[in-house]
Image: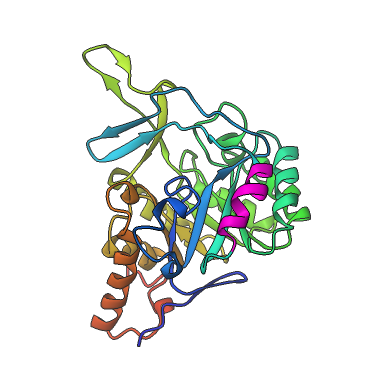
Amino acid sequence: MVDLGIKIHNLDLKNPVMTASGTCGFGEEIADFFDLSRLGGLVVKGTTLKHREGNAYPRMAETPSGMLNAVGLQNKGVDNFIANIYPRIKDMDTHLIVNVNGSTIEEYVALTERLNELDKIPAIELNISCPNVKEGGMAFGISCPSAEAVVKAVRKVYSKTLIVKLSPNVTSIAEIAKAVEGQGADSVSLINTLLGMAVNAETRKPVLSTITGGLSGPAVKPIAIRMVWQVYNAVKIPVIGMGGIMNATDAIEFMIAGASAIQVGTALFIDPTIPVQIIDGITQYMERHKIQSVNEIIGSLQC
């Protein structure tokens, strides 16, 4: 029996496979497709302090090798999450992680303080990298000073595992990772989507209402792996990798490059059972290569 257990700060994950925020709601939406207790962790939909309507439609588009989205963090706010959603999902047998978003540092802090009080939420993913909102979001994640400021403020009020989600739309993601590690981040997750655009040749108009949106899926995988490898070599905290992971081989490649765990996102729109296929595939890979612990794979790249 191989050991799939992974540790992300204080989180003991039964395996390294998590779902990515914004791709499976609050977990209930995919619960009919597989046993959610098989997941290492489930990152729920992005949550803000107040209700957000999100961007105007159309806000999703398929491209030849990926998906563009500009949902804009549509959600009903943290109070609704605490009152109505948390009671329904809190007893799921996997680690529940809330993706946290804000327009100001004060919003990030106020939201985080409320989540810190929830017993069954052992971690947050601090999203300083969303490209689809006009204020806040990616703005905090594109420079070291702004990333440091928001992480420092949140760290003061949040005592559990703090994961910071990074943007690829920067000059050096490794420098941003080092900056947030210096302010108390327990882990970093990367990459968020790359800024992209689609045009309708017939109408000569942009496909998305916001003109630009976040590109995810297979098209971004080589960029994501490169960034995971760069960040793994720059920081001491665990790296959670994501970006175009469609199968177990993709996941293993991210781990060889340095990811301690991985998140599955766009693939869920094609086949919601892909996370368990990836877990099984990692197990089979380890058995085939006679690897006892999945930790042996992490950062095992031979250059």
Does the rendering let one see residue 16? yes
Q: As drawn, which residue projects farthest toward the right?
A: 156
Quarter of the N terminus within the rendering = bottom left
Query: Looking at the picture, does residue 244 appear above or below residue 235?
Result: above
| Of residues 197 and 2, the one drawn nearer to the viewer in this rendering | 2
Does the rendering let one see residue 152? no
- Please identify the quarter of the rendering in which residue 160 is found: bottom right
| Of residues 227 and 240, the one drawn nearer to the viewer in this rendering | 240
Quarter of the C terminus within the rendering = bottom left
Please tell me how many numbered marks the rendered image carries.
Answer: 0
Task: Assess whether residue 84 is covered by the magenta stretch.
Answer: yes
178 relative to 195 in the view: left or right: right
**Residue beneath the point at 42% across and 23% down:** 57
Colour scheme of the picture = rainbow
| Of residues 258 and 202, the one drawn nearer to the viewer in this rendering | 202
Tell me residue 47's x, y (percent).
59, 43
**Residue beneath the point at 51% across and 55% down:** 43
Tell me residue 161's x, y (percent).
64, 63
Q: Main secondary structure of the magenta part?
A: helix
| Of residues 1 and 151, the one drawn nearer to the viewer in this rendering | 1
10 relative to 63 in the view: left or right: right
238 relative to 24 in the view: left or right: right
Tell me residue 70's x, y (percent).
44, 31
Span colored in magenta: 78-90
Task: Assess whether residue 8 is covered by the magenta stretch.
Answer: no
Tell me residue 59's x, y (percent).
40, 28
